[in-house]
Structures are given as C-alpha cells and as structure tokens.
Image: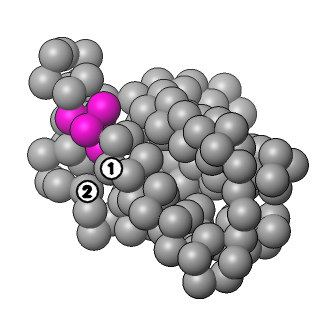
Amino acid sequence: MFADVFVILYVAHHLSDFPLQTDHQAAHKADPTFAGWRANLIHAGTHIATTAVLLLVGALVLGLHPTVAGTAAALAWIGVSHSVIDRRSIVRWWMEHTGQSGYLKHGGALTVDQAAHIGLGLLPAALALAALH
C-alpha cells in the first residue's frame, strides 16, 4: 500500500503546486500579511482537497482501504507541512546554513522547497497511511 499511496500523494502534490496554484498564491504565499497568509492557506487547502480526491479515486480503482484515522492524519500533515514549508523561511534558513547560499541566490530555492515537500511532507503522510490501514 505504501508505494500506491506515495505515488498518489506525489501526483496530487505536483498538480496542486503547479497547474492548480494561481500566480497570486505563488507570489504572495510567503508574505507576512493577512493576504499572504490567506494565499498560503488557500494553497494548502488545494493540496488537501486534491489529495483527498485522488486518494478516493485510488481507493476505488486500486481497492485500497485506508482508515479514516490514517487518511485524516495524512491530509492534516500534508496541509500543515505544506503551509509551513511554503512560508519560505525554513528553506531560506536551511540554504543559508548548509553552504547553499550561492544556490539560493541563483534560484535553487524551488528545488530545495520541492525536496522538503517530498521528504518532510509526502513521505511521512504515505507512511502514516500505510501504517494505519
């Protein structure tokens, strides 16, 4: 079940982060304003909704049987972790303190951001879904 749900989460993540994210959300989700938090939370909500729909489709098509508790835990983790990572301060801090400041200056934040979403967001969510089925 782990591989199945990880692929589903991965696809949902990329759909939510690229074709389903508006220009406004991308430009303002890290702003320290009400509008920035609003953009961030709507974007995180898109991740939760997209993931929920694809998990339902996956459950129906693949015969997966995730529990309500596992699904709720995974969706909550995806929403919270995505929101926190997209505030950008963690990614910036990481890059500035691990010898990647040059990479940061040349646009590397997107790559580190995506790695954080996969390793800190999707992987634990997939593990929770698999462990709590």
Q: Name the residue under label 2.
A: 21
The residue lying furthest to the right in this view is 131
The x, y position of residue 6, in whole percent, is 69, 65
Residue 98 shown left or right of residue 113 in the figure: right
Q: CB under 8 Å between callouts 1 and 2?
A: yes
Is 41 within the magenta? Answer: yes
Q: Mark 1 points at which residue?
A: 46
Cα distance, mark 1 to mark 2? 8 Å
Dividing the picture into quarters, in which one does residue 35 lie?
top left
Q: Which residue is drawn at 29% across and 34% down?
A: 40
Magenta highlight range: 39-43
The x, y position of residue 73, in whole percent, is 64, 36
The residue lying furthest to the bottom in this view is 61
Q: Tell me the quadrant of the picture where the N terminus can be found.
A: bottom right
On the question of residue 63 being in view, the answer is yes
Dividing the picture into quarters, in which one does residue 42 lie?
top left
Task: Specify the amino acid type for callout 1.
Answer: Thr
On the question of residue 12 being in view, the answer is no
For the residues carrying marks 1 and 2, which lies nearer the camera in this image?
Answer: 1
